[in-house]
């Protein structure tokens, strides 16, 4: 839209340079461009410190980050396109480091031996297998068995014999963990809530809907 002496020219964001750090706004970009044009390095550095103070007031959430002052100076360099010759309290960041992508986290591709127990069970079993025989190992096996029984009931909604859990431990460990003879687990709570992840309704060990825990969780009274 062309302007004459009686009209006002309108500017749109699509017509101007894209902001490297939108959270600071275009006025900060103009400040940075002006300080880059200052010929004296000492004055340029002093003006840079003033711009950083403005940036800090515009982005108060930066205080929640560790070493936030250095991050503000890093942001200043990024806004300047890393083309900024000043005496800063922190070293200038390298563009290749700032723009680099994080390394991919390797994913576990091994199939889960028992999905209703989850993958972490295998790691726990490996830990127990490496433990020397004794009271500590027996206590670890007992705690593992109780947890596995709970996971079993979440996905199967039925009673389960302790012997079944013990057999699963020895099978998943490929014989490396032997359940001590005479090991007993605590009795099941008939009112316990064995709800699947993401489900509000639980079931007790008798296979009935557990209205008590469901209503308590949702702040309701059973009618």
Image (cartoon, rainbow, N blue to C red):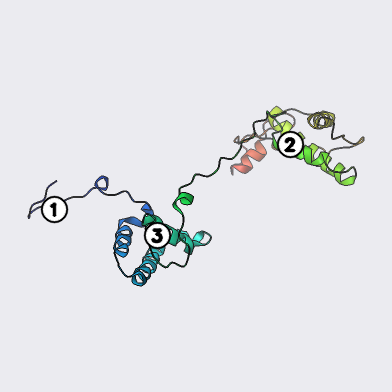
Closer to the camera in the image, 151 or 213: 151
Q: Which residue is mark 3?
A: 76
What distance separates the C-alpha of mark 1 from that of mark 2?
69 Å
Sequence-earlier tag: 1 or 2: 1
Q: Which residue is mark 2?
A: 121
Specify whether residue 49 is in view. yes
* Residue located 84% across and 34% down the image: 176
Q: Which residue is mark 1?
A: 8
Check disc 1: other Cα within 10 Å, few if <14, some if 14-19, many if 20+.
Answer: few
Q: Quadrant of the C terminus?
A: top right
* Residue located 72% across and 33% down the image: 117
* Residue located 38% across and 69% down the image: 45
What distance separates the C-alpha of mark 3 from that of mark 2?
48 Å
What distance separates the C-alpha of mark 1 from that of mark 3?
33 Å
Sequence-earlier tag: 1 or 3: 1
Callouts 1 and 2 close, C-beta under 8 Å: no
Q: Which mark is residue 100?
A: none
From this view, report whether residue 28 is shown above or below residue 172.
below
Specify whether residue 186 is in view. no
| Residue 191 placement (x, y as % from top left) | 73, 38
* Residue located 72% across and 34% down the image: 151
Viewer-nearest of discs 3 and 2: 3
> As drawn, is 200 to the left or to the right of 58?
right
> As drawn, is 93 to the left or to the right of 222?
left
From this view, report whether residue 95 is shown above or below residue 34.
above
């Amino acid at each position: 839209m062309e302007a004459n002496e009686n009209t006002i020219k309108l500017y749109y964001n699509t017509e101007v340079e894209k902001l490297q750090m939108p959270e600071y706004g275009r006025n900060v970009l103009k400040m940075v461009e002006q300080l880059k044009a200052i010929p004296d390095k000492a004055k340029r550095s002093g003006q840079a410190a003033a711009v950083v103070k403005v940036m800090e007031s515009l982005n108060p959430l930066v205080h929640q980050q560790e070493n936030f002052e250095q991050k503000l100076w890093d942001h200043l360099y990024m806004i300047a396109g890393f083309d900024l010759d000043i005496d800063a309290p922190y070293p200038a960041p390298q563009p290749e480091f700032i723009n680099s992508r994080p390394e991919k986290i390797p994913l576990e591709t091994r199939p889960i031996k028992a999905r209703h127990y989850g993958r972490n069970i295998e790691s726990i079993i490996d830990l127990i297998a490496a433990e020397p025989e004794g009271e500590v190992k027996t206590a670890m096996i007992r705690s593992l068995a109780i947890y596995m029984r709970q996971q079993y009931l979440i996905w199967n909604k039925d009673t389960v014999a302790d012997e079944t859990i013990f057999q699963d431990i020895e099978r998943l460990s490929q014989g490396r963990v032997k359940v001590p003879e005479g090991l007993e687990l605590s009795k099941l709570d008939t009112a316990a809530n064995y709800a699947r992840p993401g489900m509000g309704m639980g079931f007790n060990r008798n296979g009935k809907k557990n209205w008590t825990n469901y209503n308590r969780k949702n702040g309701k009274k059973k009618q």
